Amino acid sequence: MMLTVAAAYTAVLQTVRDMGTEVLPFEVVTRRVLREPVKADRPFPPFDRVTMDGIAILYDSFARGQQIFGVEDIQAAGAPRLQLSNTANCIEVMTGAILPELTDSVIPYEQLQATDHEGFRRFTITGEVTQGQNIHRRGSDVAEETVLLSPGTLIGPAEAGVLATVGKTLVEVARLPRVAVIATGNELVPVDATPEEHQVRISNIYSLMASLQQCGITAVYVHLPDEEAAMHERLEPLLRETDVWISSGAVSAGKYDYLPAVLQRLGMQQRFHKVQQRPGKPFLFGTFTNGPVVFALPGNPVSGFMCFYRYVLPWLRAAMGAQDEAPVYAVLQEKVTFNPSLEYYLPVKLQSLPDGTMGAIPQPYHGSGDLASLLHADAFMALPSDKNIFEKGSCYQIWRFR
């Protein structure tokens, strides 16, 4: 039975299995999914921090009418905290330095006039002063023990900086799924080969592998000929070595589309085969009891590409414990007509609109074999199956791949 997109998506996510965790040095966890809370080991900032170069004074001295302050010392960033010995004086301070004791306000150099008298440096305040100005107070950003990063966070540059700030040198992250990417077809030749008239270079697989690499996953690559015994022989060892199979091709109704039968002989439980969608209608999904999940994608490149972002990527994210992503929507910029009773994944180019919304411009493509059409698109827009006319200005969910 052919499933709706919603039913197929639910069936896929019902099979999610936890990939487990591993502990790695913080320098190598970019693009990994955090699996433990990361807390502030001390307040942020950890001390009263000077935010401008200038002088630190006790405000009460200025409030009593004093405007000229002699310099006792210089408080540099990274130096131990100094103490003002005479509240009629000041200490020069640098941005990032700890605020000296017995001072409570910082006046920037731009509001000072410097003089030297008998080797003693003085500053005259020429502007207004507010008590506590130009000081970033201890703990004003984050209190000690505050959870800064929650499990499920995808670690990027900002998160890496936080890990370093709190001294988190070893980090518990989700183990990456072991993925096999499987190409099928006698017509496929290596990228560096010169194809004969009846052949094409392998390309779908490299799109899929590049998409996986964006998730930090390096896949094993397997090429299967259109021959049942050879398929069985090549796939059987992978049952024990991998968590996920992503195949391209051999799942339609052709005479040489042997893959579904081979998978079932290996013990795969077929969850569904065919989805009410275009592109990607022949998509097959199954599981092994103690083996990998199987995403058998259609061989046409646009079909496989769409199915990866609509089904495979959400499964991988869930298996690694990543936080749910909020749905993204865009406004259709042209009228679209689509007659089949299928959910239509329309390639679109995205643009920012003056009202702050995102626009989606339909991109022409010549069927699900037209991979080059995706060079000009950023996303697939999901147009529901219960309509056949989609007006300009209507809003629908998109699935971004760029």
Image (tube, rainbow, N blue to C red):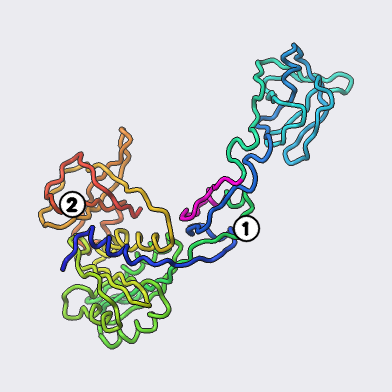
Task: Find residue 24 and report its horizontal and vertical position in percent.
Answer: 57, 63
Query: What label does residue 169 carry, if any?
Result: 1
Q: Nearer the viewer, residue 83 or 215?
A: 83
Boundaries of the magenta span? 145-161
Query: Which label number is shown at residue 87?
Result: none
Q: Residue at x 53, y 53 (%)?
A: 37
Is label 2 in a helix, a strand or a loop? loop
In-image side of 268 versus 211 (left or right)? left
Rate crowding at label 1 as few (under 14), some (14 to 19) or many (20 or more) other CA atoms within 10 Å.
Answer: few
Asked if the residues shown at circle 2 and circle 1 are in contact, with their CB atoms under 8 angstroms apart, the answer is no
Residue 152 in magenta stretch: yes
Q: Residue, x 21% and y 56% (percent of image)?
A: 365
- Relative to 317, residue 46 above or below: above
| Relative image position of residue 53 (x, y in whole percent) | 69, 30
Query: In which quadrant is the N terminus drawn?
Result: bottom left
Residue beneath the point at 23% across and 61% down = 7
Q: Dot 2 corresponds to which residue?
A: 384
